[in-house]
Image: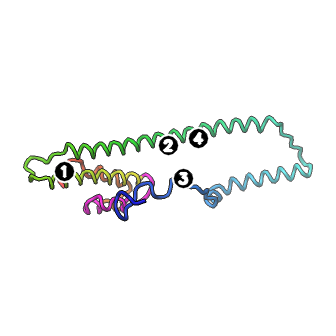
Amino acid sequence: MASRLGPGRRGPYTGDMIVRQKIPWGGVARTHYCVVGGMLLYASVITVAHEFGWINVNVPAAVPGVLGTALSILLGFRTNSAYNRWWEARKIWGAIVNDSRTLARQVLTLFALPEGAPDGGVAKAEHQRGMVYRQIAFNYQLCRDLRGEDAAADVEGLLPVGERDGLEGQDNSAGWRSRSRSPLAWCSS
């Protein structure tokens, strides 16, 4: 499927998913080796002691049932909380995208050149294009910043060279752009 953004450009959802399909077992082992090793040693000692008759372990059948029920309730609350956070973020992102579309539509229909500006549709179209492309670049930058990725490739054709150069080395490039350039300054560039 060809990209609507032009040749060599890709949209914000073509990269890797935030949640990967495979569990990184090596990372889990490196992170939790002490806890897993300690539990394995503890269970082994109890099992060996029970098999040789040194201790008698009798667990009533109700104990695992009660513990399993409590664990399932706690995991249910945790899953519900995580889903609520994800849904809230999805609603906020949807609002940002919708507001960006509304802004672009308003710029294209309501924008007028300032007094004393040279007359002509070309200048007006260039100002409109610059404002809309900056808003598109802001959305791409925000998406990449939230994922911890570099947004330089996404905004390459959308921003003027001077603005693109200022993004290098910024931790929050979308926030830096919104603080460094006011919407009124967009009209004068």
Q: Which of marks 4 and 3 is nearer the N terminus?
A: 3
Residue 92, numbered circle: none
Image position of 22 (left or right of 114): right
For mark 1, give the secondary structure: helix
- Front residue of this view, candidates 127 and 109: 109
Tag 4: amino acid = Thr
Distance from label 1 to label 2 (Cα)?
36 Å
* Residue underneath mark 3: 19
Image position of 2 (left or right of 46): left
- Compared with 79, 173 (above or below) is below
Q: What stretch is highlighted in magenta?
A: 146-165
Tag 2: amino acid = Trp
* Residue underneath mark 2: 86
For mark 4, give the secondary structure: helix
* Residue underneath mark 1: 187
Give me the residue at 76% from left, 36% from top. 65
Contact between marks 4 and 3 (CB within 8 A): the answer is no
Distance from label 4 to label 3 (Cα)?
15 Å
- Front residue of this view, candidates 72 and 34: 72
* Residue underneath mark 4: 79
Q: Earlier in the sequence, mark 2 or mark 3?
A: 3
Q: Quadrant of residue 5?
A: bottom left
Where is residue 116? Give x, y as percent.
7, 49
Where is residue 1? Give x, y as percent.
43, 59
Mark 3 Cα-neighbour bin, 10 Å: few <14, some 14–19, many ≥20: few
